[in-house]
Amino acid sequence: MSDAPPILRHPEKAHRPDQSQPKKPSWIRVKAPTSQGYKDTRDILRNNRLSTVCEEAGCPNVGECWSAGHATMMIMGEICTRGCSFCNVTTGKPNALDVFEPGRVAHAVATLGLKHVVITSVDRDDLEDGGAEHFAQTIRAIRHRAPGSTIEVLTPDFLKARPDALETVVEARPDVFNHNLETVPGLYPTVRPGARYFASLRLLQRVKELDPSMFTKSGIMVGLGEDRQGVLQVMDDMRAADVDFITIGQYLQPTPKHHRVDRFVTPEEFSGYEKAAWGKGFLMVSATPLTRSSYHAGEDFARLRAARQARLAT
C-alpha cells in the first residue's frame, strides 16, 4: 500500500479540514498480519507486479484473506479518475493500460490455486469503454490458465463509457457481477460525487436483462450518516433490480482528509440488517462490521449457488 501522504495520494482532498474519528470499538480491531501464508501471497502478487484492492483501499481483512491465499486483484493501474470521499485509492491521471496484465493476473490465480477470484478496478473515465474490454480479456485469460476457478468481477459504473461497455463484460461470462451502490442516495453528493445512484442501480438491473442466469451482487457501507430506513430502502431498490447478494459493512475512515465516520454501527444492528435482508428475498446476505465486498467471497459464492438451486427446487 502506498505510504504517500494524503496531500499527494488524494490531491482533491488536500484542501479539506481534518475530520476527527471516534475511537474504534472492540469489534472493529484486527490483528496485524504475520503468518507465512500472508507472506507467500504477498510475494506472488509482488512477483507478478499486481495491485490489489486489499492494499490500495486499506482493507482491515487483508491479514486473514492473504493468510488463506485469497486476494482481490485490482486491474488497470492504481490511479483512479474519480475522487470519492470514502476511498483510499489514489486519484489522478492514470497510465496507459498494460496489455500483459490479464496474463499476469491469470498466472497469479493459477499459482495461488484460487477456487474463486475477485477482479476489480479503478474507475477509468479516460477510456472510451471504461475498461470493459480489459475486464473481458482478464476473464478470458483466467478461464484459459485456471479453468477450475470461478470468477467474480467488481466493476465501476461505466457512467461515461460508450453504451455497449456493460455488454462487453457480461458477454465474457463472469460467474458473479458485482457493482457496489456504496451508500444511500441522499449521501451520494458528498460520498460518491462522481457517480449517480440510479445509474448504478440500472447497471445491476441491466446485467440481469442481458443474462438472467448471472449472479448479481452489490454492497453498501454504514456509519456514513445514513439512517435505518434509508438502508432498508436501498435493500428494496436492489431487490427491484433483482440483485441476488447484498453486503453491508462498517465504513472506516482511511485518513483524516476522508469522509468522517458518523458512528460505529453495533453488531446487534448488523444482525437486524441481516435479518431484514433475508426477509426481502436476497439469496445471500453478509452484514457484519468487517464485511467487505470480497470478504469470504469464495465461500459465499458456494452458498449463493446452493441457495439458487434450493429455491429452484421448491
Image (cartoon, grey):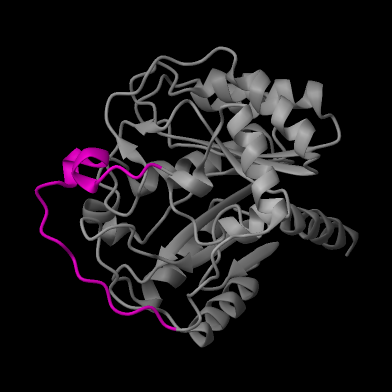
304 with respect to 179 (left or right): right
Residue drawn at x 58%, y 71% as measured from the top left: 277
Q: Position of residue 201 (x, y in %)?
A: 45, 47
> Residue 23 falls in which quadrant of the image?
bottom left
> Residue 139 falls in which quadrant of the image?
top right
Number of marks: 0
Residue drawn at x 69%, y 48% as measured from the top left: 70
Q: Where is residue 65 in the image (x, y as percent from the top left)?
A: 65, 56
Residue drawn at x 72%, y 58% as measured from the top left: 300
Say if the magenta span includes residue 79: no
314 with respect to 235 (left or right): right
Residue drawn at x 42%, y 30% as measured from the top left: 158
Q: Is residue 297 visible?
A: no
Instruction: Give the answer, above or below, for where 94 lies relative to 234.
Output: above
Q: Position of residue 15 (x, y in %)?
A: 9, 48
Magenta span main SS: loop
Magenta segment boundaries in residue numbering: 2-25
Q: Give the position of the C terminus as an image quadrant.
A: bottom right
Q: Residue extending furthest right?
A: 313
In front of the other: 282 or 46: 46
286 with respect to 124 (left or right): right
Q: Give the position of the N terminus as an image quadrant.
A: top left
